[in-house]
């Protein structure tokens, strides 16, 4: 399961009190909800050339990690941010410096940050796996950094995942660049937009340009069996599409293997 600590479109975070945090953890345990991932606020931009935005983002990310720690959450997913016109290399190094500060200020917390792949529009870094690798490599506290692959984002960023063969090529590329072992979360979304279009429009599983064959390859990949997979598909008013998307994914699981939980 993935949660936000508050609306992802506002800066303010309110810490849960002790009792709420305890109830959350006890309920998650009783319901078998594990792991739980926190998605950081969308406003955070650790790569920004604007010092004030960066400082505000660092402060907000420290709060996100503290929030996660209170709820027993191990990973916070973060979009690495936009370079604001300064170029990808500048954005990558700015993001790494900001992350270092977030990690240093939360040094005692057992919480890490998973950098999410992006569609790569509007100066956003993270559309190339090399961006994420370079950010991680230039942080001294890199043992608390990992990556989150979003199927829609990597697809529109130019990584083909439509067939078993295409997924295998992309998986090998991920392994070569960042290491598949650094992949701690997957976001499973089909894409309304085409391969390499850099347009980020999530759609229901099997109804977009990726299609069921690609998801079948991903969901049955034994290298990913310990990696949590989160749906970020559009919501219907009655919430029924979440169930439909989940059923579609489950129907793709090879029958000679135990189903994923
Ligand atoms: Zn995502």
Image (cartoon, rainbow, N blue to C red):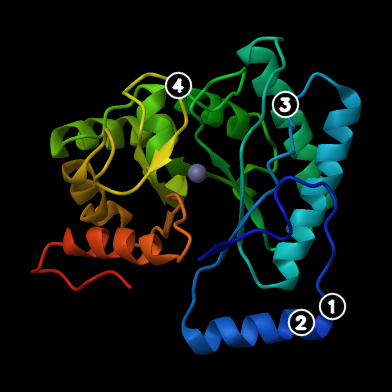
- Find out whether the residues at labels 1 and 2 contact each other: C-beta distance under 8 Å: yes
Residue identifier under label 4: 198
Q: State whether label 2 is within 8 Å of ligand 1.
A: no
Q: Which quadrant of the view contains residue 75? A: bottom right
SS category of the residue bearing label 1:
loop
Q: CA distance from mark 1 to mark 4?
A: 41 Å
Is tag 3's residue or tag 1's residue first in the polypeptide sequence?
A: 1
Q: Residue at x 40, y 31 (%)?
A: 154
* Quarter where residue 243 is shown: bottom left
Q: Nearer the viewer, residue 216 or 172?
A: 216
Quarter that holds the C terminus = bottom left
Q: CA distance from mark 3 to mark 2?
A: 33 Å
The mark that comes first in sequence, 3 or 4, is: 3
Spatial separation of the CA atoms under disc 3 and disc 4? 19 Å
- The residue where tag 1 is placed is 17
Q: Which residue is mark 3?
A: 47
Name the mark nearer the viewer: 1 or 4.
4
Ligand 1 lies under 8 Å from the Cβ of mark 3: no
Q: Are the residues tagged 3 and 2 within 8 Å (C-beta)?
A: no
- Residue 225 in view here: no
> Residue shown at 62%/17% (left/top)?
123
| Vertical order, 196 against 96 (above or below) | above
- The circle drawn on residue 20 is 2
Q: Secondary structure at mark 4?
A: loop
Residue name at image x 49 percent, y 25 percent: 127
Seen in the picture, residue 140 relative to 72 is either above or below; the reply is above
Element type at mark 2: helix
Q: Is residue 256 left or right of residue 82?
A: left
């Amino acid at each position: 399961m993935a949660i936000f600590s508050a609306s992802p479109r506002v800066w303010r975070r309110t810490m849960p009190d002790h009792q709420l945090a305890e109830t959350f953890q006890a309920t998650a345990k009783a319901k078998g909800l594990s792991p739980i991932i926190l998605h950081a606020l969308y406003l955070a931009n650790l790569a920004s050339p604007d010092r004030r935005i960066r400082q505000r983002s660092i402060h907000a990310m420290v709060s996100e990690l503290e929030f996660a720690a209170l709820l027993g959450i191990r990973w916070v997913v973060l979009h690495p941010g936009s370079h604001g016109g300064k170029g990808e290399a500048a954005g990558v190094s700015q993001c790494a410096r900001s992350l270092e500060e977030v990690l240093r200020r939360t040094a005692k917390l057992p919480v890490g940050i998973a950098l999410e792949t992006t569609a790569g529009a509007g100066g956003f870094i993270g559309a190339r796996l090399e961006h994420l690798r370079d950010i991680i490599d230039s942080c001294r506290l890199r043992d608390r950094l990992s990556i989150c692959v979003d199927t829609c984002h990597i697809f529109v960023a130019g990584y083909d995942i439509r067939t078993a063969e295409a997924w295998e090529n992309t998986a090998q590329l991920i392994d070569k660049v960042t290491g598949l072992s650094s992949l701690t979360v997957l976001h499973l979304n089909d894409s309304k937009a085409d391969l390499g279009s850099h347009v980020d429009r999530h759609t229901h599983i099997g109804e977009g340009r990726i299609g069921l064959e690609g998801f079948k390859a991903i969901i049955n990949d034994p290298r990913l069996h310990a990696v949590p997979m989160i749906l970020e598909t559009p919501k219907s008013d009655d919430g029924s599409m979440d169930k439909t998307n989940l059923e579609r994914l489950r129907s793709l699981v090879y029958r000679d293997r135990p189903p994923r939980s």
